[in-house]
Structures are given as structure tokens and as C-alpha cells.
Image (tube, helix red, strand yellow):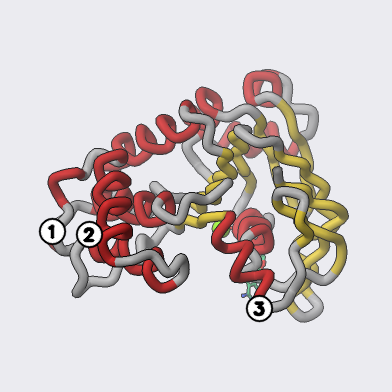
């Protein structure tokens, strides 16, 4: 579904991704792990067209990512992204937050967008919170609204960048449960996470990034049980 070939990305003279090859099948759940600065977020941002790439190619559903506005807009509809910060509009209700991009980007009517928003809020366990404002919701609930907002765009894949890192510890589980449900329903997921137990349970493949390269990759139980490099051994030791 997502094909990344020889991807290189620099910021100025700082080469952050140094040749990434990764082929992600439909329904796969990939965990990206690695030290701070290893390029995990940059890789997700490249897949979603939020960054221009210097070399290599990315394609989604067989269509190559080209760096022009029209293609990027189409791509962002195919691939949803969820961030550490939920970025909800504070003066809009949960329901309105989930409706907005549907109306603006997908040109859905108000009633279509509302029906979809109600379904997606239901799906993340927030059916009763349609009219709540973000400041009336916990961090975990706000993040679930952000997930509902992404799902309402009917993406082919979802990219998650440390979606639980901004949450109080007691709120992490409810968000991970939503992600776990999505994985079980067959959603293609690429997630940057520090939740190693979750990565081990839920992911089909684990990708360990180190200094802009894929340093190790494989089934999580295999990679955790048999780290082949000192860098991964030390990383696992720290977590
Ligand atoms: P973390 O675990 O801290 O989130 P990460 O693996 O996600 O780290 P990236 O955010 O991808 O790392 O950053 C990789 C490198 O790229 C870092 O050296 C960072 O300073 C640099 N970088 C990231 N974004 C930019 C930017 N917009 N401009 C310049 N340099 C950047
Ligand atoms: Mg990051």
C-alpha cells in the first residue's frame, strides 16, 4: 500500500533520512522506534507529503507522491495523520471538529458530515460527547476526537506520531485501545511509539531507526528477543 524507495531527506546540510526502503502492505501495523532525532517523525511527515523529499520515491496505493499541490491534497486524503498534540479547534465542539475537514476538503454536505462524525465519535467511544467542547474533555478524549476526525476522512492508512506521549499515564490505555481496535479491523497503521509492550502486542513489524536509517526490522517478538546490533540492544535496555 505504501512503497518507500531510497528516500533521502535533508534539512539544509543535515541529512536526516539517509536512504529508507520500506514496503508496507495493506492491513499491516508498523511500529517505528528509535532514539530522539533518528528521523521517525520526519519519515511520517514525508509519507504524508508534509515534507518535500530530496531523493527517492514514495507511492501510496500505486500512485507516486509528486510534489505539487494537487497530488499532495489527494494524498493527504488517502493517508491520515495524528499527532502528539491533538490540535482541536477550541471554539468548536467535538462534533464540529470532526465535521470540518469533511465539509471543506471532501465537500460533504452538513448532514452527511454530521452523520459521519456521529458514527466516528461512536467508534472511538465518544458517542455522547458530540456537543462537548475540547476543554470539557480529558486529554485522552480529545485525542480520541482527533482520531475520529482522521477516520471521518476515510483514509487508506493512518500515521500516528507519539499519540499518547502528551497524555497523563492513566489516559494512555483508552487511546491505545482505540488504536488496537483499528488494527484489529484491518486499518493500515504506521506508528511512532514509546509503548514497547503495545508495539510487541499489536504490530506486525517493528522498524528500529538509527541515525536516519532502518537499522533493524522484523516481527516484534523476533526483533525484541534477538536484537542484532548494539544500538538496538541499548535502546531496548533503556525502555
Ligand atoms: P523524537 O523522538 O525526538 O520525536 P524523531 O526521531 O522524530 O525524534 P525527527 O523529528 O524526525 O526525529 O528529527 C530528525 C532530525 O531532523 C533531528 O536532528 C531534527 O533536529 C531535524 N529536524 C526535524 N525537523 C526539522 C526542521 N523542520 N528543520 C530542521 N531540522 C529538523
Ligand atoms: Mg518525533
Provide the secondary structure element on which disc 2 rests.
Answer: helix
Cα gap from disc 2 to disc 3, whole angstroms? 29 Å
The crowding category of the residue bearing disc 2, from other C-alpha atoms within 10 Å (few below 14, some 14 to 19, many at least 20), is many
Cβ of mark 2 under 8 Å from ligand 2: the answer is no
> Residue 94: which numbered mark, if any?
2
Q: Which residue is label 3 attached to?
A: 69
Which numbered disc flags the more N-terminal residue, 2 or 1? 2
Contact between marks 2 and 1 (CB within 8 A): the answer is: yes
Estimate the x, y position of residue 4 in percent, counting from the top left.
79, 51
Which numbered disc flags the more N-terminal residue, 2 or 3? 3
> Residue 17: which numbered mark, if any?
none
Q: Is residue 236 visible?
A: yes
Q: Which residue is label 1 attached to?
A: 131
Q: Residue at x 61, y 65 (%)?
A: 74
Provide the secondary structure element on which disc 3 rests.
Answer: helix
Judging depth in this view, the residue of 225 and 147 nearest the camera is 147
Cα gap from disc 2 to disc 1, whole angstroms? 6 Å
Relative to residue 135, is residue 171 depicted above or below?
Answer: above
The crowding category of the residue bearing disc 3, from other C-alpha atoms within 10 Å (few below 14, some 14 to 19, many at least 20), is few
Q: Quadrant of residue 173?
A: top left
Q: Is residue 221 left or right of residue 155?
A: right
Cα gap from disc 3 to disc 1, whole angstroms? 34 Å
Amino acid at each position: 500500500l505504501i512503497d518507500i524507495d531510497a528516500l533521502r531527506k535533508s534539512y539544509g546540510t543535515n541529512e536526516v533520512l539517509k536512504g529508507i526502503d520500506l514496503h508496507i502492505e495493506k492491513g499491516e501495523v508498523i511500529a517505528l522506534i528509535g532514539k530522539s532525532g533518528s528521523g521517525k517523525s520526519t519519515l511520517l511527515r514525508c509519507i504524508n507529503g508534509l515534507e518535500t523529499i530530496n531523493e527517492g520515491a514514495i507511492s501510496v496505493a500505486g500512485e507516486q507522491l509528486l510534489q505539487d499541490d494537487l497530488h499532495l491534497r489527494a494524498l493527504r486524503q488517502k493517508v491520515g495523520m495524528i499527532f502528539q498534540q491533538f490540535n482541536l479547534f477550541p471554539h468548536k465542539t467535538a462534533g464540529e471538529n470532526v465535521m470540518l475537514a469533511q465539509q471543506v476538503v471532501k465537500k460533504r454536505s452538513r448532514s452527511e458530515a454530521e452523520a459521519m462524525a456521529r458514527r466516528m465519535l461512536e467508534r472511538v467511544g465518544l458517542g455522547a460527547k458530540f456537543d462537548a467542547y475540547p476543554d470539557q474533555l480529558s486529554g485522552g478524549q480529545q485525542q480520541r476526537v482527533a482520531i475520529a476526525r482522521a477516520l471521518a476522512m476515510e483514509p487508506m492508512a493512518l500515521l500516528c506520531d507519539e499519540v499518547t506521549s502528551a497524555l497523563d499515564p492513566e489516559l494512555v490505555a483508552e487511546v491505545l485501545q482505540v488504536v488496537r481496535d483499528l488494527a484489529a479491523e484491518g486499518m493500515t497503521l504506521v506508528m511512532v511509539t514509546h509503548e514497547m509492550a503495545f508495539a510487541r502486542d499489536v504490530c506486525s513489524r517493528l522498524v528500529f531507526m538509527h541515525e536516519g536509517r532502518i537499522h533493524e526490522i522484523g516481527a516484534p517478538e523476533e526483533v525484541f528477543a534477538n536484537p542484532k546490533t548494539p544500538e538496538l540492544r541499548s535502546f531496548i535496555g533503556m525502555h
